[in-house]
Image (spheres, helix red, strand yellow):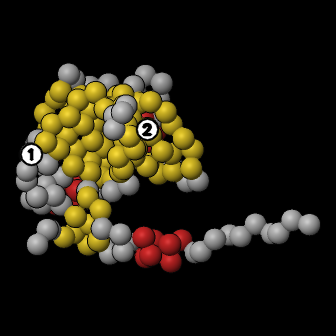
Amino acid sequence: MTSPVSEGIPPYEFRQTLGRFASGVTVITATDGEARRGMTANAFVSVSLTPPLILVSVDHRAQMHALLSREDVTRFGVSILSSTQRYLSEHFAGKPGPEEAVPWFLHEGLPLIGGSVAQLVCRKQEAIEAGDHTLYLGFVEYARYTDDDPLLYFRGQYHELG
């Protein structure tokens, strides 16, 4: 006799619980033809040092999901925002400010966010379906960083170190 499959905890309770885990804030970027696209994400994790792999989680409803799922999109960027870049997190989370306020720069044609704590250029390695999200595994081809303080997200609010 098999036991019934549990529905798990309700989405609101799950979100509130995981909101107790402090995370950095990233902007995932890619190109759509000539257009630069970005999406705020705090579901970002280092996976492996050798080879250098990261993972980002993207909701199926997000425009970035439609873009990253395309075969012709083979690379994406990750910019880890600094404590002074809250406005960029909000911009790419659906509360856009003026596009000219985004400090874009290109690395080999891939858009990244200038002034961020770190930038990564990743080759799309694998897409893994996971419930209502897709996990994109990226092979890191390029990285640069600063010693600036990161923007943090905790219990649904932005914070800074200290």
Please name the amino acid that badge 2 sits on: Leu
- Count of marks placed on residues: 2
Q: Nearer the viewer, residue 18 or 147?
A: 147
In the picture, measured across the screen, residue 95 lies left or right of residue 14, that is: left
Q: Residue furthest right?
A: 1
Q: Secondary structure at mark 1?
A: loop
Residue located beneath label 2 in the image: 137
Q: Residue furthest front?
A: 50
Q: Secondary structure at mark 2?
A: strand
In which quadrant of the rendered view does residue 112 lie?
Answer: top left
Q: Which mark is residue 146?
A: 1
In which quadrant of the rendered view does residue 155 lie?
Answer: bottom left
2 versus 129 height, above or below: below
What percent of the width, then of the height, locates residue 18? 42, 70
> Which mark is first along the chain, 2 or 1?
2
Q: Which residue is drawn at the image coordinates 56% and 50% (left, top)?
A: 130
Q: Nearer the viewer, residue 75 or 37?
A: 75
